[in-house]
Image (cartoon, rainbow, N blue to C red):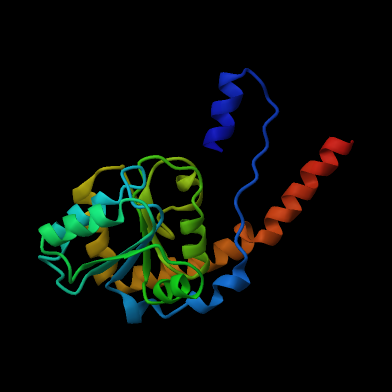
Amino acid sequence: DVWKHELESRFQMNACEILYNGVVVENIKSAISDPKEHQNEFIMLGRLGERKGTYDPIAAAEIAVGRNPKLIIYLAGDGDVEKVRTLVKEKGLERNVIVLGWIDGAEKLHYLHNAATVVLPSHHEGLPMAILEGMAAGKAIISTKVGAIPEVVGAENGILIEPGNISELAKALLWYGSNTEELVRASENNMKKIKDNFSICQTHETLSKYYKQIIK
């Protein structure tokens, strides 16, 4: 929606329609797990680098592990993999921040299954598939108020912070690491939200409607 208004404002038109990304829910089912069993485990899926805010959860972990030594953040993706690994080692966070590098397929589903929360502190974004897939797998979401993310993540299913706000990110990690009731609530709400609004079937129905509008 934010890009719809941006384009219509910039080009002085009223002709944009929104087609959200859709999730093939069946492909994510094996990643669903009991959030209570993985409460202290978080995963970030996406290219490792400044744009995705990869360095923010490392800085936040420095703060959070002092209060919750059990906290683990998995960082998965291509990009600045070795640079990120070096930084984690320099800060002595190897036990709490695990840099996986690129993962896909069954491996991605495995790590998604073994986490209760998806973290994506992007500085610039559209509507990332990592968030939608995380929601489909019943994960709580910690992300930022950029792009279309606030259109799918709210107080009922996640925590949104300002990009680059390390202290707020640390608080969010500690919140889900200790508040079981809210974690379970977010998990249930996210699976329902994807099923009702962001499944690939919903995407196809919306696209079909737009084609019919054009034909008319």
| Rendered position, 215 above or below 139 | above
Residue 50 found in image quarter: top left
Front residue (pair 25, 156): 25
Q: How many marks?
A: 0
Seen as rendered, the residue at the extreme right is 216
Seen as rendered, the residue at the extreme front is 82
Expressed as whole percent of the image width and height from the top left, the position of residue 163 reads 31, 42
Front residue (pair 97, 183): 97
Residue 111 found in image quarter: bottom left
Expressed as whole percent of the image width and height from the top left, the position of residue 86 reads 18, 57
Expressed as whole percent of the image width and height from the top left, the position of residue 134 reads 46, 64
Left or right for 180, reference 193: left
Residue at image position (36%, 47%) is 52
Front residue (pair 213, 189): 213
Residue at image position (10%, 64%) is 92
| Rendered position, 179 above or below 13 | below
Residue at image position (49%, 66%) is 189
Name the image quarter holding the N terminus: top right
Name the image quarter holding the C terminus: top right
Expressed as whole percent of the image width and height from the top left, the position of residue 45 reads 40, 59
